[in-house]
Amino acid sequence: MRTGKYETSESGNSAVGTAVSFLLIGLGIGAAMGMLLAPKSGKQIRKDLRRSYDDTMDTISDWTDDAKERFEEVVEKGAGLTEQLREKAEPLTRRLRRD
């Protein structure tokens, strides 16, 4: 039996991105197989596939937009915190330069 510490990857988001990628791939394959095995005409299947593709692309676009908005919010908060720290450290910096 092996004991010890488990190592995690450096970036926590890579696992989430991989999971989402596999989820989308699985959903796409499942939808395609379901449509290909369904008793529909080729024209109807192509129409359904196109509709599913468009819906998926819309969903991904929405997720991307949400991620961009969240990233921008984090950057703005970080800039604000940086400015606050700079203002608080300024008197100390001036004092150290005098001495």
Image (cartoon, rainbow, N blue to C red):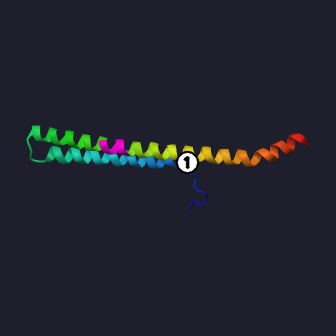
In magenta segment, residue 60: yes
At x 9%, y 44%, the residue is 40
At x 54%, y 47%, the residue is 74
> Looking at numbered disc 1 in the image, what kind of residue is underneath it?
Ser
At x 50%, y 47%, the residue is 13
In magenta segment, residue 56: no
Q: Name the residue under label 1.
A: 9
* Position of residue 6 measured from the top left corner of the image (x, y, whole percent): 57, 55
* Position of residue 24 measured from the top left corner of the image (x, y, whole percent): 33, 46
Q: In the image, 78: left or right of 46?
A: right
Q: Could you say which is closer to the camera, residue 56 or residue 94? A: 94
At x 57%, y 59%, the residue is 2
Q: In the image, 36: left or right of 57?
A: left
Q: Could you say which is closer to the camera, residue 91 or residue 36? A: 91
Q: Could you say which is closer to the camera, residue 69 or residue 29? A: 69
- Residue neighbourhood size for the residue with mark 1, other residues' Cα within 10 Å, grouped as few (<14), some (14–19), many (≥20): few
Query: Which quadrant holds the C terminus?
Result: top right
Q: In the image, 92: left or right of 85?
A: right
Secondary structure of residue under mark 1: loop
Which residues are the magenta region? 58-62
Count of marks overlaid on the render: 1
Q: Could you say which is closer to the camera, residue 75 or residue 98? A: 98
The reply to whether residue 10 is visible in this rendering is: no
Query: Which quadrant holds the N terminus?
Result: bottom right
Name the residue at the right extreme.
99
* Position of residue 45 measured from the top left corner of the image (x, y, whole percent): 14, 41
Magenta: main secondary structure: helix
The reply to whether residue 9 is visible in this rendering is: yes
* Vertical order, 95 against 3 (above or below): above
The answer to which quarter of the image holds residue 83 is top right
